[in-house]
Each structure stands twice: as C-alpha cells, then as structure tokens.
Amino acid sequence: MLDGENNIIRNAIKGEASAFGLLYDYYQPKIYRFIYLKVSNREEAEDLTHQVFLKAWVNLKAYTDRGYPFGSYLYRIARNLTIDYYRTRKETQSLELISEDVVFASSTAISALETKMALKKVKLVLSQLKPEYQEIIVMKYVEDMTNNEIASILQKSEGAVKLMHNRALKALKLIL
C-alpha cells in the first residue's frame, strides 16, 4: 500500500491528475506484471494495463473505500479486462511464453540465471493446474496478496479463497 494512499485517492477523486499519477506510478508495474502473466504478450499487456488505469480514472468518482488498498480495485478491473480479453479471443496462451525478464525485472545479474531456471519449473507446474488455481497461486505467491485482498478481487468470500488455495496446493502436491 502506498504511504498516504487515502489522501492521494481523495485528491485524485477531486480531479488532481498529479495525485492519480502517483497511484499510477506505484501500481502500474504490479498491474502490468499481473496482466502479462495472464496474456503472455507484451503489447496486449501494455494495452490492457492502459485500459485498467483509464477505467479507474473515468470511474474514480464512484470509487468507495472498503478498507482494502486501492490496488485491490485495480486488480479487479485488470482481472475483468483479461477475462473479457480471452472471451473475445477464444484462445489460450501458454505460460511457457512468458518472459522471465518481466516477472523478475529487479533480480540481480548474479541470480538471474537461477531465477530463470526456477521460473521455467514453476511455469511448467502451473500450466498443469486449472486456470482458477493458477490465478490463486499467482495472486498469493507472485503478487503477495492476502486472502482478504484476493477475496475482494475475485468477489468471493475469504473462506472460499482459503478453500481454493488449499485445493490449488493439493493439486500442486499431486503434480510434484
């Protein structure tokens, strides 16, 4: 969560573009990574990320604070846009096509090779899970979200998220 986020959001709602710019600067890399992990195409991820922030800006007056970080609101928009993206395309993308550089952009040069090798193993295992399990695992362990945040994004109860998370982990154990 961004320091002073509630004040920044209030200023953005009042129409201050610079306040929304702060939110954009903080959340854009995270939203882009989240979308890129789903669509595996840099240009499409950039377009969808742009659409997320455009929708957020246009609908900002309707935003109400429900006790979650502003990022939960953005992730929900991003999730819905990627669902719409796949509905219109009617094809799936393989996790194999995801560039390791996007996921681990801040890795040091020394550990980059280890990170890339680990990511290939993770992508191989994740690709064998159901899409909803993949989503839970990515939100929980890549995006480092709490069950409460995930529940807000998926519009499910926290108990349902815990159940899906446990099932996803059981499925992972069976694969491994």
Image (cartoon, rainbow, N blue to C red):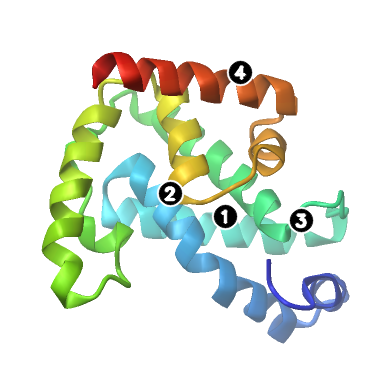
- The label nearer to you, 1 versus 2, is 2
Please state which amino acid type lies under the numbered disc 4.
Leu
Q: Earlier in the sequence, mark 3 or mark 4?
A: 3
Q: Amino acid at mark 1?
A: Val
Mark-to-mark CA distance, 3 and 4: 32 Å
Few, some or many C-alpha atoms within 10 Å of disc 3 (few <14, some 14-19, many ≥20)? few
Q: Mark 4, mark 1: which one is toward the viewer? A: 4
Q: Of callouts 4 and 1, which one flags the residue occurring earlier in the amino acid sequence?
A: 1
Dot 1, how many residues are within 10 Å of its Cα: few (below 14), some (14-19), or many (20+)?
many
Q: Looking at the image, is mark 1 or mark 2 earlier in the sequence?
A: 1
Q: Residue at x 58, y 73 (%)?
A: 26
* Contact between labelled residues 1 and 3, with CB atoms less than 8 Å apart: no
Q: Which numbered tag is attached to residue 163?
A: 4
- Residue at coordinates 35% horizontally, 50% vertically from top-left? 36
Alpha carbon distance from label 3 to label 2: 28 Å
Residue on which disc 1 sits? 52
Of 152 and 172, nearer the camera is 172
* Mark found first going from the N terminus, 3 or 2: 3
Q: Please, what secondary structure does the residue beneath circle 2 have?
A: helix
Which mark is drawn over residue 59? 3
- For badge 3, the amino acid type reads Asn
* Residue 82 image offset from top left, x and y in percent: 47, 39
**Above/below status of 138 relative to 129:** below
Q: Position of residue 96 (x, y in %)?
A: 17, 38
Instruction: Give how far across and how far down residue 78 sits, in percent.
Output: 55, 47
**Where, quadrant-wise, is the N terminus in this rendering?**
bottom right
Q: Is residue 54 above or below residue 110?
A: above
Which quarter of the figure is the C terminus placed in?
A: top left
Q: Front-most of 87 and 107?
A: 107
Residue 165 coordinates in the image, percent (x, y) = 53, 25
